[in-house]
Image (cartoon, grey):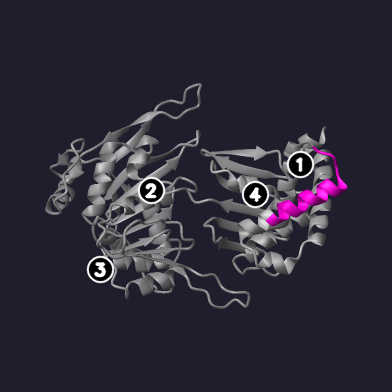
């Protein structure tokens, strides 16, 4: 294999190790010739340009003899290693990649267009991977070692990073970098096939009429993307408080106060939880509260806020169906230190939640709204759900692409009346059921 091919595809078998050695040699030579104090005073772009210039002189002086393409490739790799994140740099520069998964030094996967694929890349050693991880976590003033083997953080550039190292990770240091997708509008999601125009009109009416909406789905189904799109329907004059573990939402309104939780410091102190932020937000005169994901005792505070004057709030929950979402809210609410019976939690959920929007990620990587369901139960009765929209898939064909159509069903009369009072038109695809008994409802048993 030629030097050029080893530089361009550095991680196939032994050639990858040889090339990793070549990069390490020139990285060491580069560090010998630069003034670190001077480099620290330069801006990032100037620092990279200076390193590239110095390394070019070293290669011209000491060899090896390379073509211009080989020379540029080597310089880029050495500078990436010295300044950036090594083999991860080109992956971070690729806008089509939404997630980078490093499962030890020899296994790198990425997600593109909803599909996960393994790349022919590897780190030269476990030590090199650990150096990259330490460089990443140091940018957010965190450390990772045997006494603190897990880190979950957001980089200054916006990506969410999760690190877990041995002895917890048996295959070696594991790094996951999740790049937040750009903010999609609801019309753009229609173009992607995530929902149709009638569903958009209905969801828009729900948000503007101040229905409390729970967005439910599994990992990677697009909950945050949909939540962000729905939040764009909130009137611009309202005061919105967003609460997240890692700030992903990108609201465009003027009066937005984003809050982000904080993990404990190295001494185990200073933690600010989602629950702390939800409680504090109630003292900030919000018109709407948006919680990126409820996953613990803060669920009870969120439900109480939704049912006591903060109508029109939005939240996401990790669940695989609308019924599961309600049961999970009940379970999470019980995790509060406030001892509240399950039956009382049913009352809280029935009075707080109006709509559950269920998202599903299919085998072909597509993400769709598979159900819009209304919670029509009251008081302490079992949860009863009325589906008003659903995705009906076709049998999977030889192309393995999931196809189907959206089906729309009548709305309960009390819901249609609430939309009418709010001056929100009922989308033409949805009729009105005269009686709740005429609707196909189902129970979630808890």
Residue ID for mark 2: 226
What residue is rendered at 48% in x and 63% in y? 245
Q: Earlier in the sequence, mark 1 or mark 4?
A: 1
Nearer the camera: disc 1 or disc 4: 1
Position above or below: 153 against 68: below
Residue ID for mark 1: 71
Gap in angstroms between the C-alphas marked 4 and 2: 29 Å
Residue 168 relative to residue 189: left or right: right
Q: Earlier in the sequence, mark 3 or mark 4?
A: 4
Gap in angstroms between the C-alphas marked 2 and 3: 25 Å
The secondary element bearing badge 2 is classed as helix
The secondary element bearing badge 3 is classed as loop
The answer to which quarter of the image holds residue 212 is bottom left
Could you say which disc has been placed on residue 89 in the image? 4
Which residue is more in the foreground, 443 or 109?
Answer: 109
Gap in angstroms between the C-alphas marked 3 and 1: 66 Å
Position above or below: 90 against 421: above
Residue interval drawn in magenta: 50-66
């Amino acid at each position: 294999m030629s030097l050029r091919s080893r530089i361009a595809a550095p991680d196939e078998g032994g050639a990858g190790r040889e090339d990793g050695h070549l990069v390490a040699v020139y990285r060491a030579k580069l560090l010998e010739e630069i003034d670190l104090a001077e480099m620290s005073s330069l801006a990032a772009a100037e620092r990279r340009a200076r390193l590239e210039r110095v390394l070019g002189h070293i290669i011209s002086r000491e060899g090896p003899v390379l073509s211009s393409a080989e020379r540029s490739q080597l310089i880029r790799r050495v500078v990436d290693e010295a300044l950036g994140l090594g083999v991860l740099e080109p992956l971070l520069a690729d806008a089509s990649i939404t997630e980078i998964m490093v499962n030890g030094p020899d296994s790198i996967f990425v997600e593109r267009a909803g599909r996960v694929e393994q790349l022919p890349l590897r780190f030269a050693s476990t030590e090199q991977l650990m150096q990259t991880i330490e460089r990443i976590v140091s940018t957010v003033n965190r450390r990772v070692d045997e006494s603190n083997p897990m880190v979950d953080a957001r980089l200054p550039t916006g990506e969410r990073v999760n690190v877990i190292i041995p002895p917890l990770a048996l295959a070696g240091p594991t790094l996951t970098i999740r790049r937040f997708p750009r903010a999609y509008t609801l019309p753009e999601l229609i173009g992607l096939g995530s929902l149709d125009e009638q569903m958009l009109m209905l969801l828009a009416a729900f948000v503007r009429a101040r229905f409390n909406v729970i967005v439910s789905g599994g990992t990677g189904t697009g909950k945050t993307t949909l939540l962000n799109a729905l939040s764009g329907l909130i009137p611009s004059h309202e005061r919105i408080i967003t609460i997240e573990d890692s700030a992903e939402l990108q609201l465009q309104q003027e009066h937005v106060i984003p809050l982000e939780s904080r993990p404990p410091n190295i001494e185990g102190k200073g933690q600010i939880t989602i629950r702390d932020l939800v409680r504090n937000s109630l003292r900030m005169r919000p018109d709407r509260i948006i919680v990126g994901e409820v996953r613990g005792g803060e669920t009870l505070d969120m439900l109480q806020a939704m049912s006591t004057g903060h109508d029109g709030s939005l939240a996401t929950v990790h669940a695989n169906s609308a019924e599961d979402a309600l049961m999970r809210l009940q379970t999470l609410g019980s995790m509060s230190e406030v001892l509240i019976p399950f039956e009382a939690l049913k009352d809280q959920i029935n009075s707080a939640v109006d709509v559950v929007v269920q998202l599903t990620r299919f085998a072909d990587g597509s993400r769709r709204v598979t159900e819009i369901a209304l919670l029509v139960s009251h008081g302490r009765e079992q949860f009863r759900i009325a589906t008003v929209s659903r995705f009906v898939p076709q049998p999977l064909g030889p192309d393995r692409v999931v196809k189907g159509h959206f089906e729309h069903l009548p709305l309960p009369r009390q819901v249609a009346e609430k939309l009418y009072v709010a001056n929100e038109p009922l989308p033409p695809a949805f009729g009105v059921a005269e009686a709740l008994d005429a609707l196909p409802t189902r129970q979630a048993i808890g």
